[in-house]
Image (cartoon, helix red, strand yellow):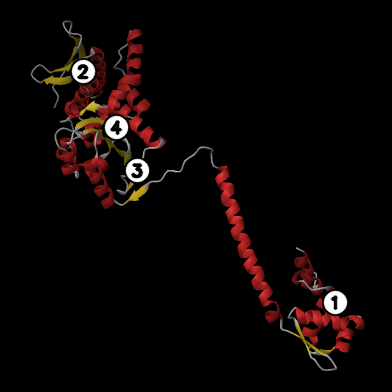
Amino acid sequence: MLAEKSIANGDLPASLEEFGLSKYEAKAYLTMIGKGSLAASDLAYYANLPRTKVYQTVKKLEKKRLAVVSKQKPLICSAIPPEEAFGEILNLHERRVKSMRKIVERLQKINDEGQRPKSSEERRYFILDPDSALSKVGNLVASSRSSVTATLDSWGLRLLSQCKSQLVRALTNGVRIRLVVDTQCAGSESLSLLPDGIEVRMAAVQSSVIIFDSRSMVSVDSRNGKAALFMSLDVYGAAQLARFEDAWNRATDLKYVLNAQPVALAKAFELSKMLENGISAHILDYAINGEDPSIELLDVIEKQYGLRLADIKAAEMLDVADSVLKITCLGGLKYDKSNNIVSLQSKTDGRNALLCAFVLLSYFRLTGNEARIIQNKQSLQTVHLKLSRPIA
């Protein structure tokens, strides 16, 4: 800081003090590089130095390798050029600065480590390209000992279906394989490639995660096919395992929706959630007030839940309702074309069949096909819907 101020103020003698020169030495050196070689007496004159101090001053400059003094009289003093004179000093300072930087970096690292949460652990994972992901998943399936569990979107299902021989080997060794597959995969060729013995259920799936023996895990990025391999399950892996179990318990067995169309099945899953979470309360409120629950029901479903059913064809709407019954109550739907009656049956709770009937009632009325509900008094688990005209 002192040197910077001295240079800014034009005080070069004071600046040279940074290089270890005294005031007299700085004046003498500056005079010599400005005037050239000088006799000792002339140097004293031009540098404004006491004559008694000149000889001692130039000998010190010579010792510091900043000047050369002749050995014969009269003594002639010559300055060594600045780049040569101060080059070694500059190199020394640069080495010291680099060393100091390294020390600061090490100190900062220690500081960063100290700022980390106590008792935290660093976990590592490996990024795999698509080909490596397929190979690694196949090896992990084949070497699994007790279980393989996975939530799979379409990309993940396609990846796992390519490991058929490894899946067969795992099943032969008694490994339990459970898959929760996204509803959009209904009708997918990849499902048909899976060997018998694998337990498959369907639900809405956001990403593909495969867990092997509750010890290692592969997470697949469906945007590019790359995967992250975790060789041990930390807190994140344990959470993924718990998430799978929750998804498995909520998912629908594949056999109940195996023949459903993917688009209709996706709508059925959405509608099933609505019937469980809110639409049933809406229908009950209307019924308590003595109003027709089907009035504006499709409009409520669209505005509150974002599911538009008004534009789909009647045959697809029946497929949606059939899938809803299979998903929620192991039931189903039949259409008697000769009598123009739609029958909805539940094998567990007749409430779901009735709720689904109100949705169909609202749909058919909106499309100009007047309908009315006929409750089966002999079986509360069956509801009939009489239409005014046949479904095209």
Q: Residues under labels 3 and 4: Cα distance?
A: 27 Å
Q: Residues under labels 4 and 1: Cα distance?
A: 87 Å
For label 3, count other residues whose C-alpha is less than 10 Å away and answer few (under 14), some (14-19) or many (20+): some
For label 4, count other residues whose C-alpha is less than 10 Å away and answer few (under 14), some (14-19) or many (20+): some
Quarter assignment of residue 372: top left
Residue 324 versus residue 283: which sits nearer the camera?
Answer: 324
Name the spot of residue 75 as percent of width and height, x first: 83, 91
Is mark 2 in CB contact (under 8 Å) with mark 4? no
Q: Residues under labels 2 and 3: Cα distance?
A: 60 Å
Q: Report helix, strand or loop for mark 4.
A: loop
For label 1, the residue is 24
Q: Amino acid at mark 1?
A: Tyr
N-terminal of the pair, mark 1 or mark 2, is 1
Is mark 3 in CB contact (under 8 Å) with mark 4? no
N-terminal of the pair, mark 3 or mark 1, is 1
For label 4, the residue is 204
Name the spot of residue 367 as percent of width and height, x first: 23, 25
For label 2, the residue is 370
State whether residue 23 is above or below residue 329. Answer: below
Locate the C terminus by quadrant: top left
For label 3, the residue is 231
N-terminal of the pair, mark 2 or mark 3, is 3
Q: Which of the two marks, 2 or 3, is nearer to us in this view?
A: 3
Q: Is residue 22 left or right of residue 366?
A: right
Q: Which of the two marks, 3 or 4, is nearer to us in this view?
A: 3
Name the spot of residue 331 as percent of width and height, x first: 18, 19
State whether residue 198 is above or below residue 54. Answer: above
Q: Amino acid at mark 2?
A: Glu
Q: Residues under labels 2 and 4: Cα distance?
A: 33 Å
